[in-house]
Image (cartoon, rainbow, N blue to C red):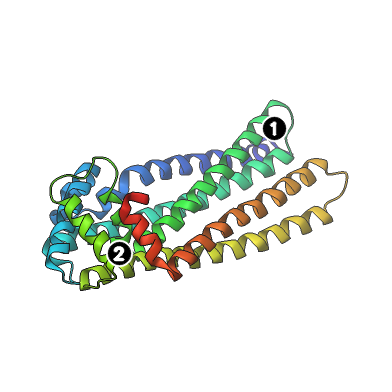
Amino acid sequence: MTSTTLLRPWQALTSAAAATTALVVAFVLAPAALASSRATAGLGSEANLIATFRSAFVGYWQTGNADFGAELQPVVDYWFRYHVAKALLAAALLAALIALGVLSWRTFLRTGGLRAAGLAVSGVLSTALAVVSLAAVMANIHGMAAPFGSLLPMLFGNPKASGPLPDTLAQVRQHLADGQNSPALDVIRSDYVKFHAVMAVEGTLVVLALVVLSVLLWRGFARADRAERRSRRLLAAYGVFVPLLALTLAVIVVANATTAAHPLPALESFFAGGW
């Protein structure tokens, strides 16, 4: 085996690590710039986004109309574009992390000493970050599907609501408690349901994919030569981890499906500040 052949896995690892690092930076810094337009240039600042949305929401509720209007529509459009950018970058990052993890573990199986320890750390870290990236992909998909619904949490938390917003939120709570309907409240309710329904659907698809992956891992474990202890331990470790991840996600799916099917209690709790 030539030295060039030996270098190839490390060159591939270096390239995958560099791509991953670049995508992490892009995921953090690029979405606001990609989503911005002349009309929404100031929304890249979180403080400005929260203040603008709160003010627009008050105006929207006061009109009582289903149409978002000139003040709220640009914020919703910006937030949609923001989630599109985030989802695409998170998907690219997930792919890069999977590649980095696979390369790390493959090289680990052929390497000994301190290098093997470093590769094991790389494999574990890549797996952990891949889970985070998967969560980011899912969060941004349902944020993209229901951008208005995903903006609603900005009505609460810091900075504390002030001005006319507390009175507006009190009116929303009163309408929900009394069973009153209005075009604006119908839009709030429908986007809230859509937000959770999309999460339930995409979560179900991911759970099914993880179940298939679990089966493949345990088949690989059963077929592996008993002499290949490292390989069998690695397959067994992921064979346990992946079903646990699927089970955790299944619980989240059930919670979101329940909320989508029976939104009123959750929506009342949400507007009471229970997000």
Compared to 263, does 158 lie above or below?
A: above
Q: Nearer the viewer, residue 27 or 170?
A: 170
Q: Of the numbered discs in the image, which one, if any, rests on residue 177?
A: 2
**Front of the two marks 1 and 2:** 2
Quadrant for the N terminus in the image = top right
Residue 134 visible to an observer of this rendering: yes
Assign a secondary structure to mark 1. helix
Q: Which residue is at 45% across, 55% downward? A: 137
Q: Residues within 10 Å of mark 2 (few under 14, many from 20)?
A: few
What's the distance in space between the residues labelled 1 and 2, CA to CA? 60 Å
Which image quadrant for residue 115? top right
Q: Residue furthest front?
A: 178
Q: Position of residue 68 (x, y in %)?
A: 18, 67
Q: Which residue is at 61% across, 56% downward? A: 246
Q: Earlier in the sequence, mark 1 or mark 2?
A: 1
Asked if residue 35 lies left or right of residue 204, the reply is left
Compared to 97, does 262 lie above or below?
A: below
Q: Are marks 1 and 2 in contact (CB under 8 Å)?
A: no
Q: Position of residue 88 (x, y in %)?
A: 40, 57
Q: Which residue is at 21% across, 45% downward? A: 161
Asked if residue 82 lies left or right of residue 239, the reply is left
Q: Of the numbered discs in the image, which one, if any, rests on residue 46?
A: none
Assign a secondary structure to mark 2. helix
Give the total of numbered labels. 2
Residue 84 visible to an observer of this rendering: no
Q: Amino acid at mark 1?
A: Ala
Q: Amino acid at mark 2?
A: Ala
Q: Of the numbered discs in the image, which one, if any, rests on residue 116?
A: 1
Q: Position of residue 86 (x, y in %)?
A: 37, 53
Q: Position of residue 125 (x, y in %)?
A: 57, 38
